[in-house]
């Protein structure tokens, strides 16, 4: 039997993850949706009733559950073609804060959760010789800025981990896409100051789907951030540390 293609989104209950679920559904993909807020996942499933959608309540910091839930999702759908690790948190940090608990919480969700999920996914896709992995990183991972040391670190780590996965898996026929959004109008951005070029999550979702089609490896959304970050990445440290960004 030919089963229709399926996408799994980890962190699908709001923002970019929910917008991506809508965009995938629009393209006819079946959906496995993972997050903690089951009510939001189920609301999304009711809205997207033209495709098969299953919801899985899960906290990505319960690392021991990830590999088993991945196997369950494979069994439930028979095939999974695209896996998106989107779960992420950016906790508020003041200019004089050096709070290990806050930084650890961000590492737990943004980095360790990604590894707990994408390692078993990589193993499966590597054995199959096909599959698409997508990781939602950030422009924030491209430099260590004064405003968000912990969050910057998590996104730098995630980008490097995704690059290494890509270097391992490309030769096996598996694709890995790193997505680096700028500012996206989601719950995460609430209360953030000094934002600009803010895009709706729907625009980020469309950019991600286009990048998957084009077999891209790394994208910035919106694309103009690619140019900006190529300049910012090359500002010498001695100058960069004097800037307020
Ligand atoms: N918004 C921006 O400007 C921006 C810019 C660059 C990168 N990003 C990245 O984009 C991704 C999505 O963020 P967003 O802006 O769409 O914010 P959001 O609306 O707050 O979405 C965050 C998602 O992560 C999930 N999540 C958080 N902690 C989790 C946990 N412990 N277990 C399972 N799921 C968890 C949330 O689900 P539950 O709370 O239901 O568990 C939610 O679905 C993040 O990785 C973020 O770092 C965002």
Image: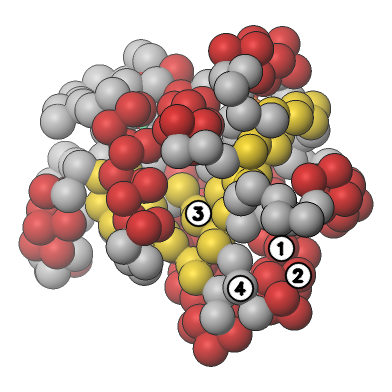
Q: Disc 2 versus disc 3: distance between alpha carbons?
A: 17 Å
In this rendering, the label closer to the viewer, 2 or 4:
4
Mark 2 and mark 1 in contact (Cβ < 8 Å)? yes
Mark earlier in primary sequence (4, 3): 4
In this rendering, the label closer to the viewer, 4 or 3:
4
Disc 3 is placed on an element classified as strand
- Look at the image and tell me in which quarter the C terminus lies: top left
Residue 101: horizontal and vertical position, in percent?
Answer: 66, 37
In this rendering, the label closer to the viewer, 1 or 3:
1
In this rendering, the label closer to the viewer, 2 or 3:
2
210 in relation to 60, above or below:
below
Q: Residue at x 36, y 58 (%)?
A: 213
Mark 3 and mark 2 in contact (Cβ < 8 Å)? no
The residue wearing badge 4 is 130
Image disc number at residue 165? none
Disc 2 is placed on an element classified as helix
Mark 3 and mark 4 in contact (Cβ < 8 Å)? no
Using the image as rendered, state which of residue 188 and residue 50 is in the foreground.
50
Q: Residues within 10 Å of mark 4 (few under 14, many from 20)?
A: some
Q: Disc 2 versus disc 4: distance between alpha carbons?
A: 9 Å
Q: Residue at x 50, y 76 (%)?
A: 166
Disc 4 is placed on an element classified as loop
Q: Disc 1 versus disc 3: distance between alpha carbons?
A: 12 Å
Q: Disc 1 versus disc 4: distance between alpha carbons?
A: 11 Å
Q: Quadrant of residue 55?
A: top right
The residue wearing badge 1 is 121
In this rendering, the label closer to the viewer, 1 or 4:
4
112 in relation to 98, above or below:
below
Mark 4 and mark 2 in contact (Cβ < 8 Å)? no
The residue wearing badge 3 is 135
Disc 1 is placed on an element classified as helix
Q: Is residue 10 visible?
A: no
């Amino acid at each position: 039997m030919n089963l229709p293609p399926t996408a799994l989104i980890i962190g699908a209950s709001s923002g970019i993850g929910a917008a991506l679920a809508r965009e995938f559904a629009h393209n006819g993909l079946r959906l496995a949706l993972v997050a903690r807020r089951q009510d939001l996942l189920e609301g999304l499933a009711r809205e997207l009733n033209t495709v098969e959608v299953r919801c899985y309540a899960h906290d990505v910091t319960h690392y021991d559950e990830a590999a088993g839930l991945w196997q369950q999702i494979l069994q439930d759908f028979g095939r999974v073609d695209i896996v998106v690790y989107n779960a992420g948190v950016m906790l508020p940090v003041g200019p004089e804060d050096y709070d290990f608990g806050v930084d650890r919480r961000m590492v737990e969700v943004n980095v360790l959760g990604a590894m707990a999920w994408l390692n078993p996914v990589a193993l499966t896709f590597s054995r199959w010789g096909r599959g698409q992995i997508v990781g939602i990183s950030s422009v924030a991972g491209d430099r260590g800025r004064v405003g968000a040391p912990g969050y910057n670190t998590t996104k730098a780590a995630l980008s490097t981990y995704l690059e290494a996965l890509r270097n391992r898996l490309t030769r096996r026929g598996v694709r890995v896409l790193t997505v680096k959004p700028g500012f996206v109008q989601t719950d995460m951005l609430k209360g953030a100051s000094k934002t600009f070029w803010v895009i709706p999550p729907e625009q980020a979702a469309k950019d991600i789907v286009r990048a998957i089609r084009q077999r891209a490896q790394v994208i910035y959304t919106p694309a103009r951030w690619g140019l900006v970050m190529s300049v910012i990445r090359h500002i010498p440290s001695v100058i960069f540390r004097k800037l307020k960004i």
